Amino acid sequence: MKNFRDLKVWHKAHSLALESYKATVAFPKQEMFGMTSQIRRVAVSIAANIAEGCRKRGNGEFQRFLNVATGSASELEYHFLLAHDLGLVDHPEYKRLTEAVVEVKRMLSALARKVEVERLAG
C-alpha cells in the first residue's frame, strides 16, 4: 500500500480541486446544483480516486483507480470548456484551469504506465 500524500500527482490533483472550488464561487446561484456541483464533484473525484487506489492491495486495483481518476479528469476538462462557452469562466481562467487538468492527466498516465510495468514484472 502506498501513501497518497507521497505522490506528486495527488498534490497536483488536490490543488486542482481547490482551484475548481475557487473558480466556481462566482458562478450564478442557479448553477449551484448544475455546473458548480458537477465541477466540484468531479474535481474532488480525481484526488479521491488516487487516494483510494493507494489503499488497495495490488497494482491491478491501483491501476484501475488511476484510470477512473483519468476519466474524471477528462470530464472536468469538458466541464471547464462548457463553463467557458457559457460565459461562466473567462478565457485566461479557462486556459489556466485546462492546462492544470492536462498536466494532471499526463501525470496520471505516466503513473499508470509505471504501475503496469511493476504489475507485469511482479
Image: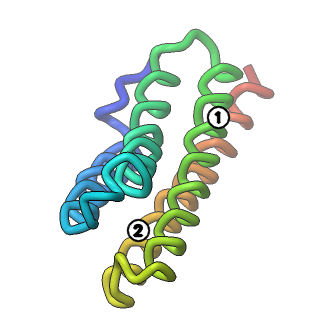
Which residue, as the protein is rendered here, is positioned at the far bottom?
91
Name the one closer to the observer, 47 or 26. Answer: 26
- Above or below for 40 versus 48: below
Find disc 1 in the rendering and name its residue: 115
Which residue, as the protein is rendered here, is positioned at the far right?
120
Task: Give the residue at x 63% y 14%.
Answer: 58
Find disc 2 in the rendering and name its residue: 100
Task: Give the residue at x 32% y 81%.
Answer: 93
Q: Position of residue 106 (x, y in %)?
A: 57, 61
- Above or below for 42 versus 98: above
Direction from residue 116 to residue 80 in the image, left or right: left
Label 1 close to label 2 by CB (< 8 Å): no
Q: Position of residue 112 (x, y in %)?
A: 64, 42
What kind of residue is marked 2? Ala
**In terms of secondary structure, where does tag 2 sit?**
helix
Which residue, as the protein is rendered here, is positioned at the far top?
57
Which image quadrant for residue 66? top right
Chain-order first, disc 1 or disc 2: 2
**In terms of secondary structure, where does tag 1 sit?**
helix
Q: Quadrant of the C terminus?
A: top right
Binning the other alpha carbons within 10 Å of mark 2 as few (below 14), some (14 to 19) or many (20 upward) gives some
